[in-house]
Image (cartoon, helix red, strand yellow):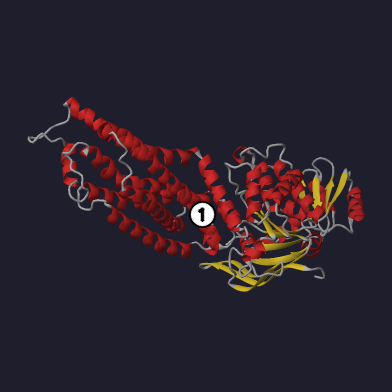
Amino acid sequence: MTSTVVADVAHVTRRFGTFTALDDVTLQVAEGEVFGLLGHNGAGKTTLLRVLNGLLVSHGGSVSLLGMDPIRDGKALRRRTGVLTEYPALAELLSARENLAIYASIHGMAPTEIEVAISETLNVLGLGGREDEPVRGFSAGLKQRVALARALVHKPDVLMLDEPTTNMDPVAAKDVRTLIHRIARAEGRTVILSTHNLAEASELCDRVAIVRHGRIIAVGSPAELAARFAAGVTVSIEVGPGEADRAATALPSPMAVEVINGRTLRVADADQDVPAIVRKLVEAGHDVHAVTPHQPTLEDVYLHLHDGERLS
Amino acid sequence: MNWNAVSAIVRKDITTVLRNKGVRTPLLVAPIIILVILPAFLVLGGEVLAASGQVPVDAQGATPFDRLANQTTGEATGIDIDEPGGWERFVLEVFIAPLYLLVPLMVATVIAADSFAGERERRTLEALLHTPTSDDELLVAKVMAAWLPAVTIGVGGFLVYSVVANVVAWPEFGRIFFPTTTWVLLGLWVTPGVAALGLATMVIVSSRVDSLQAAHQIGSLIVLPIIVLLLVQVSGNLLFNPVRVAALGMGIWAAAAIVLRVAAQHFRREQLAVRM
């Protein structure tokens, strides 16, 4: 990693009683990077964020964020980080503006700065003129916007987002993802994103670490991981109605062919063979109506690493 | 100590309490009952009942109120129940005194339970833990957020009660007789200590339970010493006088300091984060 390292985690372990939540975790996050922690619920992602921000001590290894020790320099560190927790955790009887003002004060901003910062943040996040209403009446998506605004109001160097779209409907989730993308890219902020949403990680992250049972089992960009762990290009082929079973037998036996339905076949690792496959099918008397290549995705990598299976 | 951060958290918590009808209402209703309705009823209602002849009288012509007062009063308080105004002084100076201590105690415990266990239950505590505050600043902020309203309501209640006491006893005395030295000590010296003790206890309770309901249930046991104090007071065994109240206040402040010190050991970011 050539650029400045913002987060440096080396061989970190964290236990809760006999349960090991983080097991020998090592990773680095570069300045300006959007880094994803991808894993099931309970994989250890939130614990890692809490260790990074000095809420939990590590039971082994070393942690440095922004060049500081999160436990020893916790107060100074948290002045430069902003955290969106899994739940919005807002004071529900206060307005969005009041919520932001209180957290800006806690971060040591002067009253004059606070007004400007709140206006700027609300402009970016757009609460549709509802910033002076109690947040209790807001939808889940709007509350998450306020929580995101709260995490940003003091202009942190590192933004940590813990499951930012959990419990949200697809439209609100898409909305929040767009916001995160805009915030991360426009201001070049370092973002550490914890998620179990593969689409979210693919859309937002420069690199991801796949976390399982407290261990990092792979790190890289979505494309690198796809190339390293997933199968090659998969091709869906549409033949005539009811012909899929017969068409599958027309293809040479080493090919990994799966019949999806009466008229659709899926052939794995087929990126180099598409013309030959189509030719074989036509020679066998089948009409080929469509050929659709599928690039391997982060989802393929994730499923492969978690289930030990390669999608065919 | 970052007092800006402390005052911001205090502001947040107090504003939340003031806007929460479910918390605000009981905090106002209980003091009104104890410090306005009850003394008015006992002083004015007692006279009405006695005059109506509906109150049972014993062979010596004493009502149950007289017998209760006779057991309690005497040299220790300087109140003679048979003198004019004796009953009024018994009710207003002696009987209500321990009940009055329930006011700051109740306010402190209700707000403290909401502030500690309630925040955890509502999952709002984590956002605070991620702020640039030290553990001590968080504790001081949370304690102040419960202590200030408790003392305000306690001292405010004392002032309101002073007016009520003088008004209801006016027909008998025709002058301002309240507050007494004992009550000034209760209102300004003991009340803040009781509030501190109550909320320090709740910090410990809240750190050991998982729900607001459990915190309230265990926290309600805090009133037991006050009930004992009431019984001791009414039975005439340990009557409040200035010296005793000053000593009581000192004991309560000492206990509050000790409990608060223990509470501070329980209030660590790491421990709070582990329980989230």
Type of residue at label 1?
Answer: Lys
Count how many numbered circles sit on residues in the image: 1
Residue A166 in view of the camera: no
Task: Give the camera-side residue of A295 and A136.
Answer: A136
Question: Is B67 above or below relative to B225?
Answer: above
**What residue is shown at x 84% (from left), y 48% (from top)?**
A237
Q: Give x and y (percent) for residue B77.
A: 22, 48
Name the residue tied to disc 1. Answer: B142
Q: Give x and y (percent) for residue A158.
A: 72, 60
Task: Give the camera-side residue of A213 and B91.
Answer: B91
Chain of residue at mark 1? B
Side (left or right) of A116 relative to B198? right
Residue sitting farthest toward the left: B59
The N terminus of chain B - image quarter: bottom right
Q: Element type at marker 1?
A: helix
Q: Give x and y (percent) for residue A93.
A: 57, 41
Question: Is B99 above or below relative to B174?
Answer: below
Side (left or right) of B200 relative to A151? left
